[in-house]
Amino acid sequence: MQWYCESLTEYKRLKTREVNIGGLLTGNFHPIRLQTMTTTDTMDTLATVEQTIRCIEAGAEMVRITAPSKKDAENLLNIKNEVRKRGYTTPLVADIHFTPNAAEIAARIVEKVRINPGNYIDKKKFEHIEYADPQYNAEIERIRQRFTPLVKICREYGTAMRIGTNHGSLSDRIMSRYGDTPMGMVESAMEFLRIARDENYHNIVLSMKASNPLVMVQAYRLLIHQMGEEFGECYPLHLGVTEAGDGEDGRIKSAIGIGALLEDGIGDTIRVSLTEDPEFEIPVCRDIVKRYPRQTQEDMAGPVATALQELPYSPFEYNRRKTIAVDRIGGRNVPVVVADLTKTGEEITGRTLQRIGYTFNALTRKWNIADQAADYILINGAKWSFELPGNLKAILPAKDWRLCPDKEKCFPLFSLEDYLHAENRSATMNVVILDCFDEGKPPDESRWQPIKSDPTVVLALRSANKNAMQSVRRMFVSLLEKEVPNPALLLTESNWQTPDEHLIHFATETGALFLDGFGDGLMLTLTAESHTLLSDNDHRLNTSGRNYVHNKTPEQFINSTAFTILQATRTRISKTEYISCPSCGRTLFDLQETTAKIRAATSHLKGVKIAVMGCIVNGPGEMADADFGYVGSGSGKITLYKGKEVVKRAVDSSTAVEALIGLLKENGVWIEP
């Protein structure tokens, strides 16, 4: 394999080994399996059984249950027996951290065991230790001696195993040699995989989870490349963004990380980790997976972009494509958001602009501009009777732009053919739509040259192909090959029906490109039918969880989605970011309620990253990616972090949110809402 997938220009599933999980086959082109994890106390047998059944009836094909101690692992037998007694045969998975003895017990009971190589044997104290090769090899041998008994039990009992690396819980040993990197994540898993292969045990699934989709995607790509180089084959892959959060944020972040890989045919089973009840995760999983109806090696139907022989960029590291700046697009500018107002069917008024972040104060006669205010509006011959506020500017079809008196704030939108033959163009910015490989071929050289030589052109890339993301990515490769310096907007339309489906569609098709360093802005739009459906429905998500109710107009929804995609890809920060785990039986407080309280109190703190973690498994590790942390450390007790440094211990959970606000104030990041 040249890179990390079967094809970069057409949809082809990655061939992986077949793994049997209690009769459920995964890998080797079997359907992408859906799973979730219970949030109940594992020692509460009845509650865990009831929640497991709710997850199964929602569509879960595997259900994971935490086993943090030997007693919890032993109780898995009671849980399994009761689930089977009620007529359900869905495989159960034991989630193990820190306790090899618990794993060895669980492997004799359930169909699959998940271990975390970062804390199964190694410890994490945030210590940097310099290892010479002999010392490092001695540590690997220690892992072999402690891990091999579990491998032998799994082989004897026919139990599957997931070797699941978490970015937030890399061991001090791995961190000391590889740093906090995707390669460190890969090597953490490969050490365990090599030992299992030495024991002729192959019933293994692997995962590379992170709360940052960029880190996650790069780690999976590197893992596939490494397995191909070392073994000449690939094991099945479990996909998921860990600590994704709740609501719109959690769905978009998950869709970006999981979707970017599925688009390239990577992934055999998925879990969406939302800070919501676990049965609400499954419909989101289903919405992600149903974009890929072909579960075999067959190509997606429709035109396919020209195949690639080599890549002019590295898919294993992030580098933003270098462009010139046109107006406020490209160059060193953050990606822009273009709000589509073409379907409002009304004159542009202050009320229209309020939906995209601009509020007029009648008393002061001034505009208030929100952090998530759109940079441009796309309009279709609409009129307005006032000066556009702040830096807001308008993009109009070229025929309407010619009639617009304010050429400083209005710019034309051309098709490629119209641009090439236009007699009148803007002296500042001309937006040119390019349909990417819709007939399988890029524009010929004679059409590139006028664009390359025109420093006013901004490209708007779109594709009607089923493999639209790959087609647009292939166009970006052509731009790099032809050294076209013009910035490019991602123009993506959704014809899905529900808010969840729109979120997933937009996040997958654009987020994957931003993770590769492509795109200087977003122009998201709905088909007329989808716009009407979103306007007319009751504004509730079809998978509405405890923390997420959608009550936005289509324009608000699209605008918010665009900014959340940019936030999740770390290309433009416009709001507080929450790294929030999905809860499990280890959680020591009401995670959903607490997350909602923290969000309500801190959501105005633009650019601050706050982690809300149920326990210490990933909590301290994820502090490295968060500015402040709120981590369960005992029954009803919270530990507060600044970065990865403990600031306050044993804070009563009833007052911990106020204590967190106090910590924010002490560090000068608090502003009054």
Image (cartoon, rainbow, N blue to C red):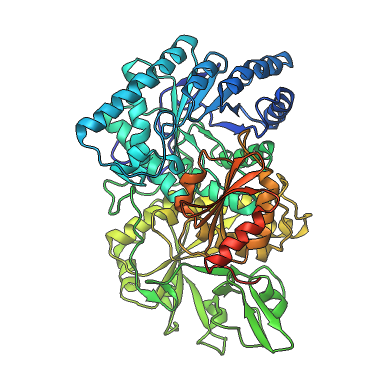
The number of numbered badges drawn on the structure is 0
Question: Where on the picture, by quarter, is residue 194?
Answer: top left
In the image, what residue occupies the spot 44% across and 40% down? 169
Query: How far from the left and from the top, in percent, is residue 477?
Result: 33, 56
Foreground residue, 77 or 351? 77
In the image, what residue occupies the spot 27% across and 46% down? 309
Q: Is residue 262 above or below residue 122?
A: below
Looking at the image, residue 584 sits to the left or right of residue 422; the answer is: right
Query: How far from the left and from the top, in percent, is residue 369?
Result: 61, 77
Query: How far from the left and from the top, in percent, is residue 53?
Result: 71, 26
Looking at the image, residue 538 sits to the left or right of residue 158; the answer is: right
Question: Where on the picture, by quarter, is residue 48?
Answer: top right
Question: Where on the picture, by quarter, is residue 346?
Answer: bottom right
Looking at the image, residue 659 sits to the left or right of residue 190; the answer is: right
Q: Is residue 197 above or below residue 10?
A: above
Whether residue 421 is visible here, answered yes or no, is: yes
Whether residue 606 is visible here, answered yes or no, is: no
Q: Is residue 84 above or below residue 361?
A: above
Query: How far from the left and from the top, in percent, is residue 606?
Result: 56, 66
Quadrant placement of the C terminus: bottom right
In the image, what residue occupies the spot 41% across and 39% down? 124
Quadrant placement of the N terminus: top left
Q: Is residue 602 above or below residue 74?
A: below
In the image, what residue occupies the spot 33% across and 29% down? 191
